[in-house]
Image: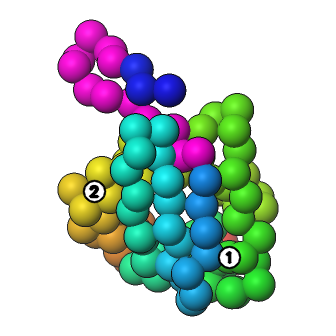
């Protein structure tokens, strides 16, 4: 269902998806839009890196209650971010790199 907030931002739900091979999914949204998204660039770090295992990645499912796709372990992405993926992916990748870099610099506790 398309909703609007006081911020004039449309909210979207994922209503269907299909695996396109590798780490790529075709998503259909409730406004009729389709997006083909390659998730490989964001599959890094302790949580999202687990999805580099293609068998785990392919366990994606649609959670109709929250209107987005989800993976085992409770991993999901806001459906509006998915809808506007090209506007967000570079920022997501940069944040993942920063997190991984910061994590690598933290000394291990003995």
Q: Is residue 21 placed above or below 10 in the rendered structure?
A: below
Q: Is residue 26 placed above or below 69 in the rendered structure?
A: below
Q: Which quarter of the image is occupied by the C terminus?
A: bottom right
Q: Nearer the viewer, residue 54 or 43?
A: 54
Q: What residue do we see at 61% from left, 69% from top?
A: 18
* 7 inside magenta stretch: yes
Q: What residue do we see at 50% from left, 59% from top?
A: 27
Mark 2 residue crowding within 10 angstroms, few (<14) / some (14–19) / many (20+): few
* 101 inside magenta stretch: no
Residue indicated by mark 1 = 57
Question: Of marks 1 and 2, which one's residue comes earlier in the chain?
Answer: 1
Q: Position of residue 39 (x, y in %)?
A: 47, 74
Q: Residue furthest top?
A: 6
Determine if residue 30 is in view.
Answer: yes
> What segment carries the magenta color?
4-15
Q: Secondary structure at mark 2?
A: helix
Q: Quadrant of residue 95?
A: bottom left
As measured in the structure, the alpha-carbon distance from the residue carrying label 1 to the one carrying label 2 is 21 Å
Residue indicated by mark 2 = 88
Q: What residue do we see at 73% from left, 58% from top?
A: 61
Image-based side of 107 in relation to 4, left or right: right
Determine if residue 106 is in view.
Answer: no
Q: Position of residue 104 (x, y in %)?
A: 46, 79
Q: Secondary structure at mark 1?
A: helix
């Amino acid at each position: 269902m398309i909703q609007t907030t006081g911020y004039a931002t449309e909210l979207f739900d994922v209503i269907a998806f299909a695996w396109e091979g590798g780490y790529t999914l075709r998503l259909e949204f409730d406004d009729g839009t389709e997006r083909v998204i390659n998730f490989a660039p964001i599959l890094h770090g302790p949580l999202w890196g687990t999805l580099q295992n293609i068998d785990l990645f392919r366990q994606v499912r649609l959670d109709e209650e929250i209107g987005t796709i989800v993976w085992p372990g409770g991993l999901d992405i806001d459906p509006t971010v998915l809808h506007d993926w090209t506007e967000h992916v570079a920022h997501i990748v940069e944040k993942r790199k920063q997190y991984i870099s910061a994590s690598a610099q933290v000394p291990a506790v003995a």
